[in-house]
Image: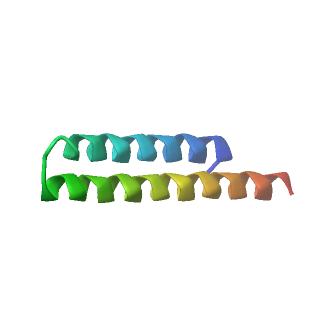
Amino acid sequence: MTTELAKKLAIALFMALIAGGLAACDDQGPAEEAGENIDESAEEAGESMEELGEDMEDAAED
Protein backbone atom coordinates (compact mmCIF):
# COMPACT_ATOMS: atom_id res chain seq x y z
CA MET A 1 0.00 0.00 0.00
CA THR A 2 1.39 3.37 -0.93
CA THR A 3 1.63 6.14 1.60
CA GLU A 4 -0.62 8.35 -0.50
CA LEU A 5 -3.33 5.69 -0.48
CA ALA A 6 -2.89 5.18 3.27
CA LYS A 7 -3.33 8.92 3.86
CA LYS A 8 -6.47 9.04 1.73
CA LEU A 9 -7.93 6.04 3.57
CA ALA A 10 -7.10 7.61 6.93
CA ILE A 11 -8.80 10.87 5.97
CA ALA A 12 -11.87 9.04 4.66
CA LEU A 13 -12.15 6.97 7.85
CA PHE A 14 -11.74 10.04 10.02
CA MET A 15 -14.42 11.99 8.15
CA ALA A 16 -16.86 9.07 8.28
CA LEU A 17 -16.40 8.69 12.02
CA ILE A 18 -16.79 12.42 12.61
CA ALA A 19 -19.99 12.50 10.52
CA GLY A 20 -21.43 9.68 12.62
CA GLY A 21 -20.43 11.46 15.79
CA LEU A 22 -22.05 14.71 14.70
CA ALA A 23 -25.29 12.95 13.88
CA ALA A 24 -25.34 11.41 17.35
CA CYS A 25 -24.84 14.84 18.98
CA ASP A 26 -28.26 16.04 17.81
CA ASP A 27 -29.92 14.00 20.57
CA GLN A 28 -30.11 15.21 24.15
CA GLY A 29 -29.24 13.38 27.37
CA PRO A 30 -27.39 10.05 27.34
CA ALA A 31 -27.25 10.05 23.54
CA GLU A 32 -25.39 13.35 23.61
CA GLU A 33 -22.79 11.88 25.97
CA ALA A 34 -22.47 8.84 23.70
CA GLY A 35 -21.98 11.17 20.75
CA GLU A 36 -19.20 12.99 22.57
CA ASN A 37 -17.53 9.65 23.27
CA ILE A 38 -17.82 8.75 19.60
CA ASP A 39 -16.30 12.10 18.64
CA GLU A 40 -13.35 11.52 20.95
CA SER A 41 -12.86 8.00 19.63
CA ALA A 42 -13.06 9.22 16.05
CA GLU A 43 -10.51 11.93 16.72
CA GLU A 44 -8.12 9.46 18.35
CA ALA A 45 -8.59 7.02 15.46
CA GLY A 46 -7.90 9.79 12.94
CA GLU A 47 -4.76 10.82 14.77
CA SER A 48 -3.59 7.21 14.92
CA MET A 49 -4.20 6.77 11.20
CA GLU A 50 -2.35 10.00 10.46
CA GLU A 51 0.60 8.85 12.54
CA LEU A 52 0.54 5.49 10.74
CA GLY A 53 0.63 7.28 7.40
CA GLU A 54 3.56 9.41 8.53
CA ASP A 55 5.41 6.35 9.81
CA MET A 56 4.82 4.57 6.51
CA GLU A 57 6.04 7.61 4.62
CA ASP A 58 9.17 7.80 6.77
CA ALA A 59 9.84 4.10 6.26
CA ALA A 60 9.46 4.49 2.50
CA GLU A 61 11.99 7.32 2.48
CA ASP A 62 14.55 5.18 4.35
Name the side, left or right, on which 29 lies relative to 38. left
- Image quadrant occupied by the C terminus: bottom right
Q: Residue furthest front?
A: 29
Name the side, left or right, on which 29 lies relative to 43. left
Name the side, left or right, on which 47 lies relative to 45. right
Q: How is the image coloured?
A: rainbow
Q: Is residue 38 above or below residue 26?
A: below
- Residue pictured at 23% horizontal, 45% vertical: 25
State the image coordinates of residue 21 (x, y, percent, origin top left).
29, 47
Q: Is residue 34 above or below residue 3?
A: below
Q: What is the tally of numbered marks visible in this picture? A: 0
Task: Name the residue nearer the viewer: 29 or 53.
Answer: 29
State the image coordinates of residue 15 (x, y, percent, origin top left).
41, 40
Task: Name the residue nearer the viewer: 12 or 20.
Answer: 20
- Residue pictured at 58% horizontal, 48% vertical: 6
State the image coordinates of residue 27 (x, y, percent, origin top left).
13, 45
- Residue pictured at 28% horizontal, 41% vertical: 22
- Residue pictured at 22% horizontal, 41% vertical: 23
Name the side, left or right, on which 22 lies relative to 8. left
Q: Residue furthest right?
A: 62
Task: Name the residue nearer the viewer: 38 or 2.
Answer: 38
Write down the quadrant of residue 40 in the picture.
bottom left
